[in-house]
Amino acid sequence: MSPSIKVLSLPFWAKPWSCEEWGHSKEDYLSCVGNEIPPVFNRHGLYLDRYSKTCWVEGPFGCHDYPEGYNYFLYDLSIFNHRPFTESERHAMWILMMSHITNRTMKELYYRDCQWWDLHKLCLETRKGVTRMLKKTEKKNEVPSC
């Protein structure tokens, strides 16, 4: 039997360095979460209890319930747990979908795979952009040698 409590890393808006470096205040953080509750694990993270269907955040400004986080948590978990299709599997699924031979579960799996690949491409492009930006700033900060 799987554990009833699942945990994910903090969302971007709740990470301590995000709050400090990007100018997020405590009020911004608190506007995203609900009432303060006593901490359960005393560790930063986004938590979900599958049995009681409650979600909470333990972050830099304490522990707060996160009522609308349940659906977000399940979506993130489904993306993180997804094993991407190989190219031949994707092509086979596409043919089945074009032939209208798929059921709802197969369609959801195909769309989840598409979402996974979109997020993967976005992460790669972001990493490339950050690398390019760092290289440009390093060139500007170089001191010419005599």
Image (tube, grey):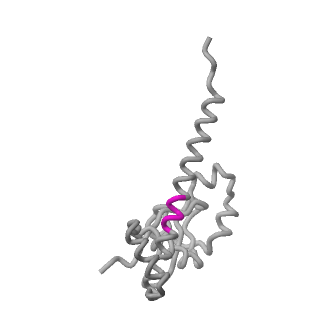
Q: Residue at x 58, y 45 (%)?
A: 130
Between 67 and 130, which is closer to the camera in this rendering? 130
Number of numbered labels in the structure image: 0
**Quarter of the figure with residue 72:** bottom right
* Quarter containing the C terminus: top right
Residue furthest out toward the top: 146
**Is 96 situated above or below 86?**
below
Q: Position of residue 61 (x, y in %)?
A: 59, 61
Q: Residue at x 48, y 62 (%)?
A: 9
Q: Is residue 117 magenta?
A: yes
Q: Is residue 65 magenta?
A: no
**Is 45 situated above or below 146?**
below
* Quarter containing the N terminus: bottom left
Q: Position of residue 42 (x, y in %)?
A: 46, 63
Question: Magenta residues: mostly which secondary structure?
Answer: helix
Q: Residue at x 61, y 61 (%)?
A: 13
**Is 95 situated above or below 28?**
below
Q: Which residues are magenta?
A: 116-121
Q: Position of residue 65 (x, y in %)?
A: 56, 74
**Is 104 situated above or below 67?**
below
Q: Residue at x 43, y 77 (%)?
A: 93
Between 52 and 135, which is closer to the camera in this rendering? 135
In-image side of 11 versus 2 (left or right): right
